[in-house]
Image: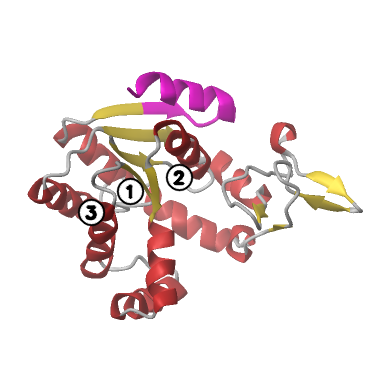
Amino acid sequence: MNILAFGPNGSGKGTQGAIVKEKFGLDHIESGAIFREHIKGGTELGKKAKEYIDRGDLVPDDITIPMVLETLAKSKEKGWLLDGFPRSLAQAEALDKALKESGMALDYVIEIVLDRDIAKERIMGRRLCANDNNHPNHIAFEAIKPVEKDGKLVCRVCGGELSARADDQDEEAINKRHNIYYDDKTGTMAAVNYFKNNSSAKVISVDGSKGIKEISEEILSQLS
């Protein structure tokens, strides 16, 4: 089973991806992790990617796509859930072509739909667990509020140390990311629409304003 997962930053896409991964035993492949692996390893592609990431720009396709395909190929037998890529129409077209050429079928496209203002509010209130970034913690939502221990907030799931990403508190940075995602001409929404209109994969669209459990149940009920 091979899956593409879409959702704006702040939609809980990573959390849902982790749930799907656990249920079906897939490799959860996050584009950010691919970049970090190459950057940490000091690869030529990693060095080039870092220049763009440091500026907050999209990494060009001729750098990103070889990284992604290399990782997907390693998970070909097990199956994968790709999260955070493609982010543009051009990347969607290139990925679709590459998957077909390599004989890897795309089975599902998961889209978490969320209003832009709500997504922004969620980003600014979320906290990251040092042990697992997919442990949901958010200061504004009662259901996933961190717990207090020894006078400080810790992860509600495992008690790990919490932190806020600097760019999660930067409205300009958030707007820049969302400008890319919500762009339905050449951005990520255009990529979503490309797969909706040009792929045999089943599309699962869910309301991201619902609770984590509701969303996961809706997604899992449509996967087989």
Percent x, y for residue 205?
37, 28
**Quadrant of the rendering where the N terminus is positioned:** top left
- For label 2, count other residues whose C-alpha is less than 10 Å away and answer few (under 14), some (14-19) or many (20+): many
Label 1 vs 2, first from the N-terminus? 2
Q: Is residue 72 left or right of residue 155?
A: left
Percent x, y for residue 199?
16, 34
- Tag on residue 108? none
Compared to residue 188, the image places residue 199 above or below, namely above
Q: Is residue 207 magenta?
A: yes
- For label 3, count other residues whose C-alpha is less than 10 Å away and answer few (under 14), some (14-19) or many (20+): some
Which residue is drawn at the image coordinates 50% and 27% (left, top)? 216
Percent x, y for residue 77?
24, 44
Percent x, y for residue 127?
67, 52
Which residue position is annotated with label 1?
188
Q: Is residue 38 left or right of residue 1?
A: right
Quick one: SS at disc 3? helix
Q: Disc 2 residue type?
A: Pro
Taking the view exactly as shown, the residue that stands out farthest to the top is 221
- Tag on residue 8? 2
Instruction: Mark 3 vs mark 2: give the one in front.
Output: 3
Which residue is drawn at the image coordinates 44% and 34% (left, top)? 20
**Quadrant of the rendering where the C terminus is positioned:** top left
Q: Disc 1 residue type?
A: Thr
The picture quadrant where one finds residue 51 is bottom left
Q: What is the C-alpha distance between the residues marked 3 and 1?
A: 23 Å
Which residue position is annotated with label 3?
73
Q: Is residue 46 magenta?
A: no
Which residue is drawn at the image coordinates 49% and 36% (left, top)? 16
Q: Disc 1 vs disc 2: Cβ atoms closer than 8 Å?
A: yes
Compared to residue 203, the image places residue 5 above or below, namely below
Q: Is residue 55 visible?
A: no
The region drawn magenta spans 205-224
